[in-house]
Image: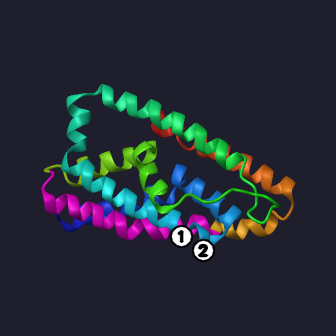
Amino acid sequence: MTWELLIGLTAFAFASSITPGPNNMMLMASGANYGFARTVPHMLGVGIGFTAMIVLVGAGVIGLFEALPVTRTILTVLSLAYLLWLAWKVATAVAPEAKGAAGRPLNFWQAAAFQWVNVKAWSMALYAITAFAPDRTGLAILIVAAVFGAINLPCVSIWTLIGREISRFLGTPGRLRAFNWSMAALLLGSTLPFLAS
């Protein structure tokens, strides 16, 4: 991989990881509702899960989309259904200190598995492999995955920190409820550009 290609990959990894999307919206809501420390497994699940996804997409999953284009439509429908359910969970989350509250942030495995139904993650992974590892050699795929692995976790951590800081202003149930419903709407809205592409 040339230096120019590596710089382009780094810029793409940063831009796509730091911009709003389903992962970042959910992490901000989790940071606001549960705090930074309790959201760490969720953040690690996103970072490690997406890195593993890039490796698997490069190693052969992308070929499935090329051979059977209908699989992409099926994935989109499943992703949308799961995102609707997640948006409902975000909208109806309650503060952990609320009496009898049973809410909890996503754990590592849930967050890692979510990458496989996250339309933005699919778009990012498919573009990253086709643009920066077009020959799909093992080394090129690993470089793409490593760059994303190094950049993604700090980016998603920023969104969790933003959520934690916002929580200072959400001291009443009404404000928290309004925030959670707003995050649910943004979660759904963040998928529209990727569903349309």
Residue 138 part of the magenta segment = yes
Tag 1 near tag 2, CB within 8 Å: yes
Side of 144 relative to 154 (left or right): left
- Farthest residue, direction front: 100
Point out which mark residue 61 bears: none
For the stretch drawn in magenta, the main secondary structure is helix
**Is 77 located above or below residue 107 in the figure?**
above
Q: Where does label 1 land, which residue?
A: 40
The C terminus - image quarter = top left
Point out which mark residue 37 bears: 2
Q: Secondary structure at mark 2?
A: helix
Q: Secondary structure at mark 1?
A: helix
Give the magenta part as a residue range: 136-161
Residue 33: percent from the left, percent from the top?
Answer: 70, 62
For this rendering, which residue is in front, 95 or 149? Answer: 95
Picture residue at 81% right of the left edge, 61% below the top: 98
- Farthest residue, direction bottom: 37
